Amino acid sequence: MFQTTVSPDGDIVTLIRGDQRARFHAIWLRDNAWDPETRAPGNGQRLIALRDIDARTHITDARFADGQLHLTFAPEGRSIVYDPEWLMTHRYDRSHDRTAGWLPRGVETWDGRLMDHVPTGDFATVRSDPAARFAWLAQIARYGFAKLENGPVEDGALFKVVDLFGHIRETNYGRKFEVRTEVNPTNLAYTGLGLQAHTDNPYRDPVPTVQVLYCLESTAEGGENMVVDGFAAARRLRDENADWFDVLSQHCARFEYAGEAGVRLTSRRPMIELDPDGALHAVRFNNRSAAAITDVPFDVMPSYYAAYRRLGQIIDDPGMEVSFRLKPGESFLVDNTRVLHARKAYSGAGTRWFQGCYADMDGVRSTLAALQDRRPEAAE
């Protein structure tokens, strides 16, 4: 059972449910009204701008009727109905973790101990069952990666993976790229050498936020795929040495790629990127694509390189990695702003053929949210 109070000046409404209390400002409540004059019923987009709301907006009456909160606004003179559950879900009157490197809601860091619980889905089931697709995508949102098993073994099958949540992000590599041994390759990913864990394409701005790698052939020895949680690595660095965390988040690195005619991609971004409120936003780490670092002050450069070295050591720590060997028809997807991926060295005997492509996390989050709305509990 909800109760409510209004401050004497009408600027603040307090919702009370048991020992829960949440305050809301009148201007925020008016801006977030869901009546049909404020929001389009079909898509929920606002029909008014903030300039249409009087800066003197305050509340003259607050009451409950049929479980809904009815608020009257002045000087507008309108009564608008609110769902108190929606308000509590979207409350901003709560304690906030402002420690640099805090994690967005629903994100869980991990290390090598996740090896026995690698997030995995079955291709056919994820494709046909909305509940299974929701569960698979939820693991990607939570851990930043997931495998998909028992897919078709055919050229372009990875497009069917992307169709589960979004759209291909085409680049200068095309809609997809091939990953197998080549003579004089333009990119080290196409050799049999092992690769250090890295994020892809840090030289792009914006960077592709999803990468899919799909196995079509794998008879060569070695070549296991591995992933490392960049958020876990960044937070470990922060806990070891806050100054080193700060220097990598407060100064930009530079990345570049010029491996083919007519292409010269460059970006300027920090290796550890934070939102303005300190939340971890992205990690960019790719030694192969690092350009000369020129945006760090002279006196800070030694500390920057010490932090850079230590972050690399943390990423290389075997205790941080989860590794697995993909069979034909299997694939994995990574949030390329968070999870670093790598490949261990493989021999020249046999064949190894992967196809890769890029997409974006907004598709993952959109599909996940749409499926959430269709879940039985969402309708209750």
Image: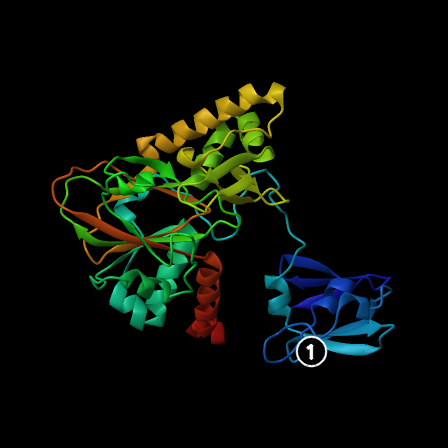
For residue 92, side relative to residue 312 (left or right)? right
Q: Dividing the picture into quarters, in which one does residue 287 lie?
A: top left
For image coordinates 46% across by 57% down, the residue present is 361
Residue holding disc 1: 35
Q: Is residue 57 above or below residue 290?
A: below
Residue situated in front as seen by the camera: 244 or 153: 153
For image coordinates 15% across by 47% down, the residue present is 351
x and y percent of residue 291 in the render? 49, 32
Residue situated in front as seen by the camera: 355 or 40: 355
Residue situated in front as seen by the camera: 90 or 342: 342
For residue 218, side relative to residue 12 (left or right)? left
For image coordinates 47% across by 70% down, the residue present is 370
For residue 84, side relative to residue 212 (left or right)? right
x and y percent of residue 52 in the render? 80, 70
Q: Is residue 255 above or below residue 23?
A: above
Amino acid at circle 1? Asp
For image coordinates 13% across by 47% down, the residue present is 219
x and y percent of residue 40 in the render? 65, 78
SS at circle 1: loop
x and y percent of residue 278 in the render? 60, 42
- The quadrant of the rendering that contains the N terminus is bottom right
Q: Is residue 9 visible?
A: yes
